[in-house]
């Protein structure tokens, strides 16, 4: 029997998870917590195998709860959050499971079954180095100054200020930062959401640029526009995105 604990400051969220867990015979709910302080006490007293941990709570975040737990006392974790692209990318990169609110029943049970399988394989707690790396990354400014990129078994942290432009290439995207190019299997639309900030703007269905590396805008015919970058690259600005670009640049 898997001992589970729900940690969420929203009563409806706790009720939802409680109802879904009640449909299973292989889990036992040992408690519910509506604050980080309650969670710390309950984890130490109940020693659950698995916790459903909300990220944003009033007294402390879910990450702060984990930072206050010794590695030996940290159970398996399924994070839950409303839309937070910063945290979601971090979970993907560092290989932690999460539920995006509002989540569907099928998604919940998929995460639960995965956790039960890991517990059966005796992976009863998260890898300490991975959890430490996740928490260190998330301790940074929530508005994100670095972008974690998994490459060849390593996680690179790319300074967003150094990203010059991003191009779509089939099912992949190419990120140009400094003298390096990173190839990722990800959509340009998803990367656009992650590159929040006034310096990044999409200028074409296949291109996002950092306006800090923009050298000049050139009109090349009736309504056609090109963006010239400081490194010499030239990109076409599509009519769909031209107005937004001009508005961003104040021209």
Image (tube, rainbow, N blue to C red):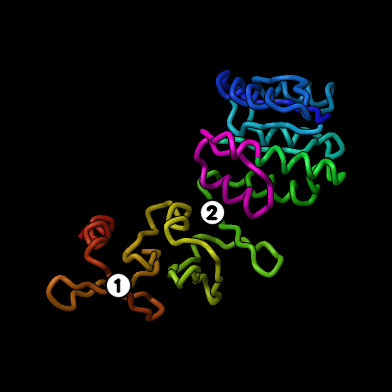
Q: Is residue 43 magenta?
A: no
Q: Quadrant of the N terminus?
A: top right
Would you place residue 166 above or below residue 7 in this image? below
Q: Which mark is residue 105?
A: none
How dense is the environment of label 2, judged by Cα within 10 Å: few (below 14), some, or many (20 and up)? few
Q: Residue furthest bottom?
A: 232
Element at badge 1?
A: strand
- Residue in the foreground of this view, choosing between 187 and 181: 187
x then y, percent, for residue 205: 34, 65
- Residue in the foreground of this view, choosing between 49 and 67: 49
Name the residue rendered at 52%, 73% in the picture.
178
Residue receiving disc 1: 227
Element at badge 2?
A: loop
The residues tagged by marks 1 and 2 sit, at their Cα atoms, a distance apart of 25 Å
Residue receiving disc 2: 145
Question: Does residue 1 appear to the left or right of 35 in the view shown?
Answer: right
x then y, percent, for residue 223: 15, 70
Name the residue rendered at 55%, 61% in the picture.
159
- Quarter-of-image position of residue 76: top right
- Quarter-of-image position of residue 125: top right
How dense is the environment of label 1, judged by Cα within 10 Å: few (below 14), some, or many (20 and up)? many
Question: Does residue 56 appear to the left or right of 39 in the view shown?
Answer: left
- Residue in the foreground of this view, choosing between 170 and 243: 170
x then y, percent, for residue 238: 26, 67
User: Which mark's residue is nearer the viewer, 1 or 2?
Assistant: 1
Would you place residue 200 above or below residue 3 in this image? below
Looking at the rendered structure, the number of numbered marks drawn on it comes to: 2
Q: Which residues are magenta?
A: 82-109
């Amino acid at each position: 029997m898997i001992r589970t604990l729900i940690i969420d400051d929203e009563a409806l969220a706790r009720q939802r998870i409680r109802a879904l867990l009640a449909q299973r015979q292989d889990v036992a709910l040992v408690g519910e917590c509506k604050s980080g302080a309650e969670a710390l006490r309950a984890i130490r007293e109940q020693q659950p195998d698995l916790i459903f941990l909300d990220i944003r709570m009033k007294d402390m975040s879910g990450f702060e709860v984990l930072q206050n737990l010794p590695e030996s006392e940290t159970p398996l974790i399924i994070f839950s959050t409303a839309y937070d692209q910063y945290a979601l990318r971090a979970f993907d990169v560092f290989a932690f499971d999460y539920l995006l609110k509002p989540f569907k029943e099928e998604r919940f049970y998929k995460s639960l079954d995965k956790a039960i399988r890991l517990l059966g394989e005796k992976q009863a707690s998260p890898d300490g180095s991975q959890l430490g790396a996740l928490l260190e990354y998330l301790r940074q400014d929530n508005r994100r100054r670095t972008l974690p990129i998994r490459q060849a078994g390593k996680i690179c942290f790319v300074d967003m200020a150094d990203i010059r432009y991003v191009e779509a290439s089939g099912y992949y995207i190419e990120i140009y930062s400094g003298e390096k190019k990173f190839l990722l299997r990800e959509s340009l639309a998803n990367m656009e959401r992650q590159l929040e900030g006034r310096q990044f703007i999409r200028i074409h269905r296949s291109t996002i640029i950092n306006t800090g590396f923009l050298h000049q805008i050139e009109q090349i015919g009736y309504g056609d526009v090109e963006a010239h970058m400081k490194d010499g690259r030239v990109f076409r600005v599509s009519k769909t995105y031209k107005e937004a670009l001009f508005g961003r640049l104040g021209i």
